[in-house]
């Protein structure tokens, strides 16, 4: 269950990162509300996941899901450039996340 909570926390991190961009420096009300709500939810779920998972593993996986998710969202929804180097870099992050999951005792 802790891995599922951590995954959801990572997805909410993508939401608040995208919302942060859309809020235009918290100058737009509803994107700002979405950003703050998603951030609080992400932190809350991360906190619950850390009850069972090691700090380093949980935090690295959380930020990795957020980083790769924000990268994918940026390319798909915001028209950011896609290059072989960016894809390879994101793939290395995913590989690291898989390694952390496989080597975790929780």
Image (cartoon, rainbow, N blue to C red):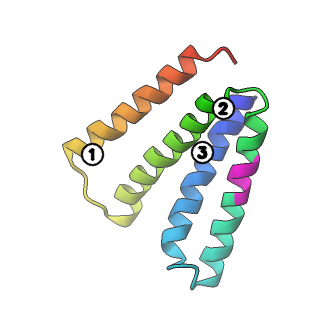
The residue that disc 2 covers is: 55
Q: Earlier in the sequence, mark 2 or mark 3?
A: 3
Q: Going by the image, does 41 lie left or right of 104?
A: right
* First in residue order: circle 1 vs circle 3: 3
Tell me the chief SS of the magenta region: helix
Q: Residue at x 74, y 35 (%)?
A: 49
Between label 2 and label 3, give the one nearer the viewer.
2
Q: Which residue is mark 3?
A: 10
On the image, the x and y values in percent for residue 95 come to 41, 27
The N terminus lies in which quarter of the figure?
A: top right
Answer above or below: position of 105 versus 49: above
Residue beneath the point at 30% across and 61% down: 80
Q: Callout 2: few (<14), some (14-19), or many (20+) C-alpha neighbours within 10 Å?
A: some
Work out whether mark 2 precedes mark 1 in sequence or the reverse, and give the earlier one: 2
Secondary element at tag 2: helix
Residue to which mark 1 is pinned: 86
Q: CA distance from mark 2 to mark 3?
A: 15 Å
Q: Which mark is residue 73?
A: none
């Amino acid at each position: 269950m802790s891995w599922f909570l951590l995954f959801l926390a990572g997805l909410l991190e993508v939401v608040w990162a995208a919302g942060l961009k859309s809020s235009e420096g918290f100058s737009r009300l509803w994107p700002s509300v979405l950003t703050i709500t998603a951030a609080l939810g992400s932190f809350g779920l991360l906190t619950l996941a850390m009850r069972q998972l090691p700090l380093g593993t949980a935090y690295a996986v959380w930020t990795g899901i957020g980083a790769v998710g924000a990268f994918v969202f940026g390319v798909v929804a915001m028209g950011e450039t896609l290059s072989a180097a960016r894809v390879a870099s994101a793939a290395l992050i995913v590989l690291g996340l898989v390694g952390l999951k496989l080597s975790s005792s929780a």
